[in-house]
Image (spheres, rainbow, N blue to C red):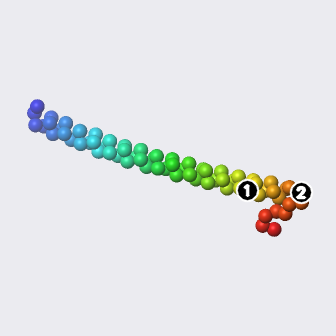
């Protein structure tokens, strides 16, 4: 194979390797972001459930509301 074509091929292979490394890093970052999003959604759900339970208790007859 002529030297120039070999150099072009080597450069292309290096570029593909670099792109694969970027893709792996991006997939890892996306996975971490999705895991964090799941954690935050679970936290928000727990907070809403707690708020609902507190509000429900306030409407029960003869029970004092929390925070009063």
Horizontal side, residue 54 vs residue 29: left or right: right
Task: Locate the C terminus and report the quarter of the image it occupies.
Answer: bottom right
Q: Residue furthest front?
A: 62
Element at badge 1?
Answer: helix
Q: Which of the labelled discs sits on residue 51, or is there none? A: 1
In the image, residue 18 lies at what x, y percent?
A: 29, 45
Q: Nearer the viewer, mark 1 or mark 2?
A: 2
**The N terminus sits in image quarter:** top left
SS under mark 2 = loop
- As drawn, the residue found furthest toward the bottom would be 68
Q: Residue at x 46, y 47 (%)?
A: 30
Name the foreground residue: 30 vs 12: 30
Q: Which mark is residue 61?
A: 2
Say above or below: 21 vs 64.
Answer: above
Q: Residue at x 73, y 56 (%)?
A: 51
Task: Relative to 54, say whether 31 is above or below.
Answer: above
Q: Farthest residue in the left direction?
A: 2
Residue located 75% across and 53% down the image: 52
Residue, far right: 62
Mark 2 Cα shell of 10 Å, populated few (<14), some (14-19), many (≥20): few
């Amino acid at each position: 194979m002529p030297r120039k074509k070999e150099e072009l091929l080597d450069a292309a292979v290096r570029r593909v390797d670099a792109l694969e490394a970027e893709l792996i890093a991006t997939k890892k970052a996306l996975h971490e972001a999705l895991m964090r999003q799941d954690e935050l959604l679970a936290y928000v759900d727990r907070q809403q459930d707690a708020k609902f339970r507190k509000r429900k208790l306030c409407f029960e007859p003869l029970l004092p509301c929390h925070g009063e």
